[in-house]
Image (spheres, rainbow, N blue to C red):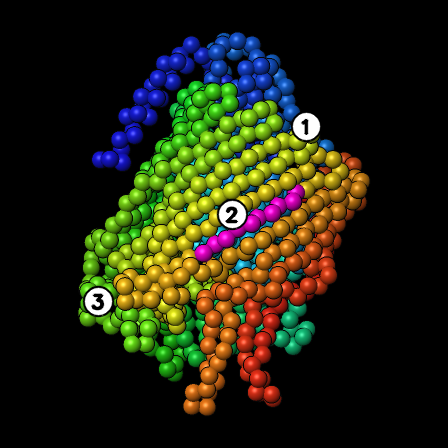
């Protein structure tokens, strides 16, 4: 098969590199935090004298192969004290390192893994990371620390406005982001309809956002990957930390199962603002809670197992008439196995579920929907030599989609039971990635992913004339639903449609000098799942659907070019990137499309295309009392759906139009100032172009009714969005030797009370008879206070 032609070449390279490395020795081991015992991701293990080095993987493991001899090693990680140690290497050795936090760790701003010069050489680009300590310092609405809202301060990342869920990356839609928690897919990342994210910051160990140059081990989405790992728990001693805020509190417990070998972690978080509503004679409920857990155990030097889970739930009720609950549940069992000091493997068995439930008591019915998947994946990392590394693996995912089910809640209900047809799919993939240092100045990463998607049989499938579920009315010049001419029933083992794609990946870095480099990347990705939503911000009611007979998979091609420079001995750094991407088969909706409880969604969908391009600039200050960054993004995001034949006009007359998440200008500033040991001050400022909108530009009378006439899709914008947030952290006893430590966090969100428009609606004034615009703004100025503690 053509897709496997590269395998012999990779095998030849691997064997060649192995032969060249036979007279060398390997140093390998694990790097961890000396106090928390957490393994550390992205630590640099460097031999400056020969310009060789390694970086720890997702489990803190490293492997470095060099000629035998005596070397001085430097083990460095931003926010930790650098270790320098001389090691005599005559045979293969296992060496574990423990790093201690530096004095200024609590105030360290970390955007990328490290600012060491080795990162300038690394081909990885379009990647951002934020330390949890940095995220906790950022001013946020209602004082609730939020991972998702924090990453929107990075270049190329925005959201759909206040009170909206999800985030948009480089002009992509929310459903085009793959969100992973301990390798399990999170389908809805928001609490309370987008006010907060589902991630408890106390339980998070590491996060990375890939915007481009995405490694081949990731697939299934075409915009970005947000990869989040939970802490493993302290295997040395029992610890407690948490926080108490105005509307929510959190608590995290961790400690050893067997000292030095096994650990546990249990975390919980809940809001309680609804408890005060009865004081205002409001019989309403609005709260969320989530639970995080992780068990880790080291069986022996070569085997470790992990069991992690997350469960979150939102509850929203209005008196006795309305009740809404939704949430995620994920579990993952992982087995790390070390075949040798050069070959590391990880086997994962993953379950992920998202469900939505809506009870309308006044009409006496219950609506439920959801998506569930089972995933098995096996990844291997092969450290063939100090100049050549391979990653390869495979995974298989089985999906079950529940588009919706309506049930009567009382015997007197006028609603009959109705079940939308469940859908099933099976997705498989294999991948290989190589990182190859070709010279002292040039390093490349190249690989490919082969994905195969099967849409499986279902109980009932509509059949249409000419296999066309959407028809064009030439008289009215509009698209309309086509009536089915029959239905077919299939067994679950039947395959309704199959798709396969080869997804090449390539990144390279060329070091211009000791302080600067240029990088470039190309990646092609496939997305077989689609979120059905015709709003700018998805809601929990939106449902996922698989590719099939009428919905094609989305296909991305993206190129990026960047310049990276460290300034003034790494006190400052500058990152400039430009990107261009195209997406085939981006779904679009005909005018008047109804997506709720639609058992024939193919009747309102057309396949179009999208494109986005832009420039991102990130200037950082990494040292001193004042630290922070300034980010600017200039970009454009468009889509179009031309007519399928010469007679059809397409959507928006087949012309390109702005996507609902297009923002031409996006400026964000984040700063931290350490006044003294007790006080730290923080500030965020955002300035963004308003979201695209479609406004009426005329009207006419029909049978005494005023009918508005709308302009072309998204040809107008909401007013410019801007906001300033500030906060102050107060540590009353910074030098205390007691185990219990606490700090106060005071914040003001939207300091100058800007009423940013979330939407603008138009209506007729009954008094004057004139049409008028009404602006909806969710937040004005919001003060907050929280108390954080650890023991």
2 or 1: tag closer to the N-terminus: 1
> Mark 3 or mark 1, which is nearer the start of the sequence?
3
Mark 1 or 3, which is nearer the eye?
1
Q: CA distance from mark 2 to mark 3?
A: 41 Å
State the extent of the magenta-drawn residues as a range.
Answer: 629-638
> Closer to the camera, 242 or 656?
656
Task: Check disc 1 and report its element: helix, strand or loop.
Answer: loop
- State the residue position of label 3: 464
Circle 1 residue: 569
Residue visible at 58% across and 61% down in the picture: 690
Task: Please rate how many residues cluster around mark 2, counting C-alpha atoms within 10 Å: few if below 14, some from 14 to 19, many from 20.
Answer: many
Side of 349 relative to 536 (left or right): left
**Quarter that holds the C terminus:** top right
Where is residue 760? Give x, y as percent.
56, 71
Gap between marks 1 and 3, in whole Å? 67 Å
Q: Which mark is residue 614?
A: 2
Find out whether the residues at labels 1 and 3 contact each other: C-beta distance under 8 Å: no
What whole-number distance in Å separates the C-alpha atoms at marks 2 and 1? 29 Å
Q: Give the main secondary structure of the magenta stretch.
A: strand
Number of numbered discs visible in the structure rendering: 3
Q: Is 703 one of the magenta-colored residues?
A: no
């Amino acid at each position: 098969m053509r897709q496997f032609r590269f395998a012999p070449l990779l095998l030849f390279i691997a064997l060649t590199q192995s032969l060249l490395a036979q007279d060398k020795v390997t140093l390998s081991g694990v790097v961890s935090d000396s106090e928390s015992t957490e393994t550390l991701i992205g630590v640099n293990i460097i031999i400056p004298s020969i310009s060789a080095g390694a970086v720890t993987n997702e489990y803190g493991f490293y492997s470095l192969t060099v000629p035998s001899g005596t070397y001085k090693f430097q083990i460095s990680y931003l926010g930790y004290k650098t270790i320098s140690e001389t090691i005599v290497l005559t045979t293969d050795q296992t060496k574990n390192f423990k790093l201690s936090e530096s004095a200024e760790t609590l105030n360290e701003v970390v955007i990328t893994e490290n600012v060491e010069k080795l990162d300038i050489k690394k081909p990885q680009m379009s990647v951002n990371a934020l330390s949890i300590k940095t995220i906790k310092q950022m001013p946020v609405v209602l004082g609730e620390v939020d991972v998702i809202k924090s990453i929107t301060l990075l270049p190329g990342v925005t959201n759909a406005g206040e009170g909206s869920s999800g985030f948009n990356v480089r002009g992509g839609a929310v459903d085009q982001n793959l969100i992973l928690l301990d390798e399990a897919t999170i389908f809805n990342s928001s609490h309370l309809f987008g006010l907060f994210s589902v991630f408890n910051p106390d339980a998070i160990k590491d996060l990375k956002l890939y915007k481009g140059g995405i490694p081949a081990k990731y697939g299934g989405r075409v915009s970005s990957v947000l990869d989040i790992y939970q802490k493993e728990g302290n295997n040395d001693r029992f610890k407690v930390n948490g926080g108490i805020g105005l509307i929510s509190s959190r608590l995290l417990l961790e400690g050893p199962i067997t000292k030095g070998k096994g650990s546990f972690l249990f975390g919980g978080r809940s809001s309680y603002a609804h408890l005060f509503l009865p004081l205002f004679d409001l019989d309403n409920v609005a709260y969320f809670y989530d639970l995080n857990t992780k068990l880790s155990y080291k069986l022996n030097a070569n085997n470790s197992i992990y069991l992690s889970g997350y469960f979150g739930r939102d509850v929203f009720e209005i008196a006795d008439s309305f009740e809404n609950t939704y949430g995620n549940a994920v579990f993952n069992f992982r087995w790390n196995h070390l075949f040798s000091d050069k070959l590391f493997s990880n086997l994962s068995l993953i379950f992920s579920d998202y469900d939505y439930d809506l009870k309308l008591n006044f009409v006496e019915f219950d609506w439920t929907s959801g998506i569930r998947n089972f995933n098995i994946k096996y990844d291997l990392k092969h450290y063939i030599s100090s100049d050549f590394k391979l990653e390869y693996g495979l995974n298989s995912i089985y999906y079950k989609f529940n588009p919706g089910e309506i049930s009567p809640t009382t015997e007197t209900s006028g609603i009959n039971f109705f079940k939308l047809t469940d859908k099933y799919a099976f997705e498989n993939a294999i991948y290989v990635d190589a990182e190859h240092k070709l010279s002292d100045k040039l390093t490349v990463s190249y690989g490919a992913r082969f994905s195969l998607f099967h849409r499986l049989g279902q109980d009932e499938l509509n059949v249409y004339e000419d296999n066309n579920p959407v028809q064009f009315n030439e008289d009215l010049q509009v698209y309309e639903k086509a009536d089915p001419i029959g239905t077919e029933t299939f067994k679950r083992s039947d395959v309704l449609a199959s798709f396969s794609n080869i997804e090449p990946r390539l990144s390279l870095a060329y070091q211009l000098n000791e302080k600067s480099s240029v990088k470039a990347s190309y990646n092609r990705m496939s997305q077989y799942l689609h979120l059905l939503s015709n709003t700018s911000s998805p809601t929990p009611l939106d449902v996922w659907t698989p590719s099939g007979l009428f919905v094609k998979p989305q296909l991305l091609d993206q190129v990026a070019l960047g310049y990276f420079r460290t300034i003034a001995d790494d006190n400052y750094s500058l990152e400039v990137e430009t990107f261009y991407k195209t997406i085939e088969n981006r779904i679009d909706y005909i005018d008047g499309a109804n997506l709720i409880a639609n058992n024939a969604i193919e009747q309102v969908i057309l396949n179009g295309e999208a494109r986005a391009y832009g420039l991102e600039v990130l200037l950082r200050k990494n040292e001193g009392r004042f630290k922070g960054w300034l980010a600017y993004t200039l970009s454009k995001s468009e889509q179009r759906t031309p007519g399928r034949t010469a007679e059809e006009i397409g959507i928006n007359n087949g012309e390109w139009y702005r996507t609902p998440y297009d923002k031409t200008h996006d400026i964000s500033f984040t700063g931290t100032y350490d006044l003294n040991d007790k006080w730290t001050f923080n500030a965020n400022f955002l300035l963004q172009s308003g979201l695209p909108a479609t406004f009426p530009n005329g009207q006419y009378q029909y049978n005494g009714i005023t009918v508005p006439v709308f302009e072309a899709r998204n040809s107008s914008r909401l007013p410019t969005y801007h906001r300033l947030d500030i906060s102050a952290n107060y540590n009353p006893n910074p030098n205390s030797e007691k185990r219990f430590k606490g700090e106060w966090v005071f914040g003001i969100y939207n300091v100058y009370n800007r009423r940013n428009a979330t939407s603008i609606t138009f209506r007729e004034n009954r008094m004057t008879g004139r049409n008028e615009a009404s602006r909806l703004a969710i937040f004005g100025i919001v003060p907050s206070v929280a108390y954080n503690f650890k023991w």
